Image (cartoon, rainbow, N blue to C red):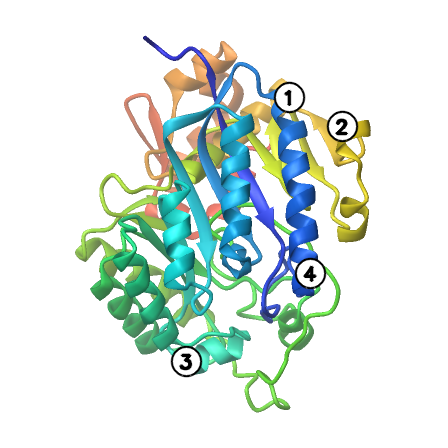
Amino acid sequence: MMNKKKPLELYVHIPFCARKCLYCDFLSFRTLASVHQEYIDQLLGEIQAASLASEGYQVTTIFIGGGTPSILEAGMMRAVVETIRLYFDVAPDAEITIEANPGTLTAPKLDVYRGCGINRLSMGLQSADNRELKALGRVHSFEEFLKSFERARQAGFWSISVDLMSALPGQTLESWKNTLKKVAMLKPEHISAYSLIIEENTPFWDYYGDGPGCSGAESSRGSENGQSGFSEEDHPQGDSIQGDSLWRPLPDEETERKMYKVTKSFLESQGYQRYEISNYAKPGFECRHNIGYWTGAEYLGLGLGASSCFHGARFSNETDLKAYLELDFLSDGLIKLYQNVEEQTRQSKMEEFMFLGLRMTEGVSDIDFAARFGVKIRSIYGPKVDRLIENGLLREEGSRIFLTDWGIDISNYVLSEFLLE
């Protein structure tokens, strides 16, 4: 019998981490372990309250991001997944991903993840060079990553994504190639390869500022889940930086561009297909959750600061931890949780169809656009599409429009062209 329910994606935010990385502007921070349980108890209440709006929907993907979700005790994560299954209709073949940092993954945790139905790991490595990791303020080594990766395989995880980051302080083209080679040898099913972007309200911004080499490649920044965050409190540096000796220079723009190009050529030579500007996968292992973001799927964010696109509106959750923990979902429902509610208009939906869909290597379909909006792409964007094709930034095949390789190189500019006045 055909399932007539509408698909829904869930994003669950766990804001805790062992130490704030020097480049990170996501909503994440250190806190006492005792707060972890308080947060999870509140999150379970939010899950129950949010499920009341999900009638007629079936959850097709769940992405548990952060922060570092794997920093939690295993039983807490099991409670989150089991509560979602209790209150939402979760598809039998749902993709359920958890982000994890090396050094936080133990064999018992991995067994619990597998036991409660988590079937995909997204591991934040960033670099195979320990000096580069230290310059980022990461708390793990490459050797710890290797141990965590092997534990995950032994636990039965056969869908693993690895996050990598190029254009790092002190990084050379050769060290980036070395990182790509070392990771490809492990044969993960998915690789996200982003270029560092220097974000405001981070120690990196304070040191490197807004000068040359700070813009990063034309790509999303480094967390696979796509949920942007906010700076929260000070960025503790611990002992990762002693004076300026480890504030190494950023690669110049020419080196950064070479890194970007070698990523595509090398990973494709290893059997990884680029399906989005910064994401590569073995056939059949593309991240279904992120594809949903880029193709206009409805998603519901759960937890501190999580963003949603649901029931024709975009909104985000309370970002202050104290205020979040004081919410009474039983009495007030979700009315005090949601902030920045913005109704989606036909125009905003058209814009998102284009500038999100064009991130995908398969581009956008004029047939899909017409089915959704009742008009052809060219009736809205004709002159812009023609000009971008003429300038070599877009190409057209049949009913589909794609970014060219050059268009991908300057994708931020190209995608901004689809914002309507």
| Residue at x 40%, y 59% (from the top left corner) | 108
In the rendered view, would you say 339 is above or below 114? above
Q: Is residue 351 visible?
A: yes
The residue beneath circle 1 is 52
In the rendered view, would you say 315 is above or below 6? below
The residue beneath circle 2 is 333
Q: Position of residue 179 (x, y in %)?
A: 32, 71
**Quarter of the figure with the N terminus:** top left
Q: Are marks 3 and 2 in contact (CB under 8 Å)?
A: no
Report the amino acid beneath label 4. Ser
In the rendered view, would you say 333 is above or below 188? above
Report the amino acid beneath label 3. Asn
Report the amino acid beneath label 2. Gly
| Residue at x 76%, y 36% (from the top left corner) | 337
Q: Cα distance, mark 4 to mark 1?
A: 29 Å
Q: Nearer the viewer, residue 9 or 396?
A: 9
In the rendered view, would you say 26 is above or below 391? below
**In this rendering, would 170 be left or right of 159?**
right
Q: Are marks 3 and 1 in contact (CB under 8 Å)?
A: no
**Quarter of the figure with the C terminus:** top right
The residue beneath circle 3 is 130
Q: Position of residue 113 (x, y in %)?
A: 41, 49
The residue beneath circle 4 is 34
